[in-house]
Image: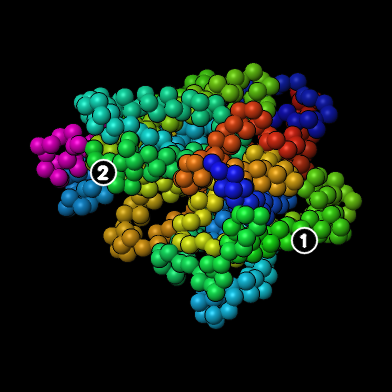
Amino acid sequence: MPNASDTERPPPSPTRTAAPGPRDVKGTRQALTVARAVKLVAFVAGAVLILSFPNMAPNPYILSAGVVVASYACTATAWNFMGGFTGYISLGHAAFFGLGAYATGLLIRDLSWPPFVAWLGAGAVVVLITIPVGIAALRVRGASFVIVSIAFVLILLLVSQAWKDFTGGSNGLVVPRPFPDLLRPEHHRVFFYLFVALLAVMLLVWWVIDRSRFGAGLKAVREDEDKAQALGVPTRDYKLVAYLVSALFTGLSGGMYALWFGDLDPIFQFSILLGAYMVLMALLGGVRHLYGPLLGALIVGGALEYFKLEYGDTQLHLVATAVLLGVVVLFTPNGIIPAATDLVKRFGPQDSSIREMTAAELLERNENEARRAADE
Amino acid sequence: MSGSLLFQSLVLGVLLGGLYALLAAGLTLYFGVMRVVMIAHSAFLILAAYLAWWFNERTGLDPLLSLVVTVPLFFLVGVGMQRLLITRLRPATLTMMSVLLTFAIALFIEGMIGFVWSGTQRRVQLPYSGSNIEFFGANIAVVKLVAFVLAAASLGALYVLLKKSRFGQALRATIQHREAAQLVGIRTDRVAALGFGLGLATAAVGGTALALDATIYPSLHWHWVGPLMAIIVVGGLGSIPGTAIAAMVLGIGQSLLQVELGTTWAQTLFYVALFATLMLRPQGFFGGRLAQRF
């Protein structure tokens, strides 16, 4: 391993070029295949578990809780397109959720579009509204961006409450059910699968972006925006596209929620709390990981639903959310997936890419190598 | 709009702007010393209002007297928060994570208020609640005037403290350039903790002033977060005079618009100002170059 402190570099000897011996290569390769197999098994098991959930749910209540958790997983994953790739934390993604929900409802009510056409239309509406907002919000970074994102939710809350003729105000907006013939449990089941399908599309898009040049640019923004800009990454356009993708998927989740739940109220759609849940779920799972938000949503969403069932609608769920968010921010800001992998790594073989050598050991090794080279 | 009505809402706007200015000064202090955007500021504001209401309910004394307890208490809480929570965050992601952390604190306070005092709307009843003062033809509620005097006096005291005292000098030095302040021997971590405490003390004063003439409920703080955040962005993050001017202008603007449009639509002024500022001058109208980076 060449080092700046090397005073003279020994010529590469044949023993050194073949540094990782054949046995080592075989070992790593085996470890890789094992890891890949474990991943595949975990993926299949997870997918089977999720898809068979509606059949395992003992009663319609649990099934509806499952639909809620699935919608949380969708929103958290959608949030992660912005939060995870660019590191811009938005507390206001509930705005897009509410916009998607209201746009779906209003397109059905006022223009009598078929439900799922209205749902796609709502996605387009969300993107159109987000373009100017994104251009304004992305002119600033960090804290100002968060402020703007919160402000956007608060504006929409105000407007949707005040503009009674259009949104129904606090009386709510009733969205007609897309499948009027289905019984409640069947309805839940269908929507559970619809949410899971939406989630699958999102995960696929995330996976593709993660491997693309575009994704690399976004990650560069996350790590150091000034350097990324200096290297020629079109940071503004990239951030805007990521913001739009994130908003689109959040809006689609909201629209799906509107079709499922059927009754919209400004306080619950444009709720800062909902935005906070998305952040909490994504952070808890790990924003840099494909399944991080999904895992976070399963934990947080499950806990929330359990909490509601046990303690009813008291103010305590606010306290619990607050404490959990505080703990995550203070102790595992990278999420539990990296924390768990670190833990596993500590018991597994040492990671060879990280040099765990003191300067004295390094010096000794360099001297030995130089001596050996001189001997030859 | 008739002349007297215009004058009336102008005066009311100034009174409101004074309160905004005090609270925004607190937010600016946090941002100045720690680069922290304190979402929980308005939650503490509502907490102070609740404490004032509770004090009045229990003792029957004037809620203003609760300041004797709440101001030192909030100061200590602020120092403790900076020492125990904010400094634990990693410097690289401090600004973002502090937003989330203080957001969590805000939720916690909201939840606890709702849990302890229930979600019922509360209002302090005072012997002078209903009385008005005639001021050049404008009718001004005494409670609003008291609130303004309180806010203006605290803002004045804060100004004197920052400009004249040795501590104030150290604090301003810390805000301007932390490393340089350390080089000349200022213990910036201690100054930052005290600055945080001072900021939270403004929330105690503001909350007590608010309790005098507002109906309070646990989730009220969201109505304050937006305007206050808009004020500090419009004024420029980190500039106390900038935020004071922005607070006055927007407070008066809100008060004038209220007559024509009603309270709900008048609130949107703050957000319109926020987005206009971002489009025209993202660093705020009085902010330095550092504002845009955070």
Q: Is residue A37 above or below residue B113?
A: above
Regarding residue A331, the answer to whether it shows in the image is: no
Work out whether disc 2 and disc 1 sit on a shared chain: no
Rendered residue at 24%/41% (across/down): A174
Regarding residue A117, the answer to whether it shows in the image is: yes
Disc 2 residue type (three-letter): Asp
Looking at the rendered structure, which numbered label has been put on residue A263? Answer: 2
User: Magenta stretch containing residue B105, yes or no?
Assistant: no
The percent coordinates of residue B148 (x first, y second) are: 65, 59
Count all numbered tags in the image, as a single digit. 2
Looking at the rendered structure, which numbered label has been put on residue B287? Answer: none
Provide the major secondary structure of the magenta segment: helix
The percent coordinates of residue A161 (x first, y second) are: 38, 44
Rendered residue at 18%/33% (across/down): A178
The percent coordinates of residue B107 (x first, y second) are: 49, 56
Name the chain letter of the residue that bears numbered label 1.
B
Rendered residue at 48%/25% (across/down): A131
Q: Name the residue under label 1.
A: B157
Specify start and end residues of the magenta stretch as a single range.
A176-197
Which residue occupies the extreme left position in the image?
Answer: A181
Q: How far apart are marks 2 and 1 (CA)?
A: 51 Å
Observer-nearest of B139 and B112: B139
Q: Is residue B244 left or right of residue A260?
A: right
